[in-house]
Image (cartoon, helix red, strand yellow):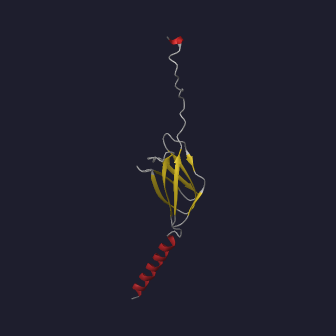
């Protein structure tokens, strides 16, 4: 009988420790769509969400969508996609048990190193 009582006390202590170890903060979610200025979805865009408590990296799916659970806090989101300018958001807040929706529009990068086409034929010195 005494042995059962001791086992029950130990189990109660372990349960109390397990409850204390679980975080009190509930996670929030960030979800959204990455598109271009013509509303075409951008797949495989690399997204970084960075805050005081967490940093997560993910990639948009075939529909240009993403979703991630994060600890509550303030974050910045960076989006990098081939052919587009880097996007950096203003700071926003993730709240416990809430979903923050982001619809991000990317702009095409300017071409580098290209010479504008000319209507003139090949210059005479090359003929």
Residue 39: % across, % down: 48, 48
| Occupied quadrant, residue 73 | bottom right
In the image, residue 94 sits, relative to residue 83, either above or below, namely below
Label tally = 0
Residue 17: % across, % down: 49, 74
Give whichever of 56, 90 is nearer the camera.
90
In the image, residue 15 sits, relative to residue 93, either above or below, namely below
Residue that protrudes farthest toward the front in the picture: 119
In the image, residue 52 sits, relative to residue 113, either above or below, namely below
**Quarter of the image that includes the N terminus:** bottom left
Residue 32: % across, % down: 49, 55
Residue that protrudes farthest toward the bottom in the picture: 1
Residue located at (54% from left, 32% from top) = 112
Residue located at (52% from left, 22% from top) = 119
Residue located at (46% from left, 57% from top) = 67
Residue 59: % across, % down: 45, 50
Residue located at (59% from left, 58% from top) = 92
């Amino acid at each position: 009988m005494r042995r059962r009582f001791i086992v029950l006390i130990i189990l109660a202590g372990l349960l109390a420790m397990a409850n204390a170890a679980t975080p009190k903060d509930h996670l929030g979610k960030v979800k959204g769509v990455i598109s271009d200025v013509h509303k075409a979805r951008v797949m495989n865009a690399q997204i970084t969400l960075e805050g005081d408590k967490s940093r997560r990296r993910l990639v948009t799916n075939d529909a240009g969508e993403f979703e991630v659970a994060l600890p509550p806090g303030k974050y910045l989101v960076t989006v990098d996609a081939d052919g587009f300018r880097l996007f950096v958001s203003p700071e926003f807040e993730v709240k416990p048990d809430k979903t923050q929706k982001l619809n991000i529009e990317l702009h095409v990068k300017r071409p580098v190193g290209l010479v504008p086409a000319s209507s003139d034929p090949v210059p005479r010195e090359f003929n």
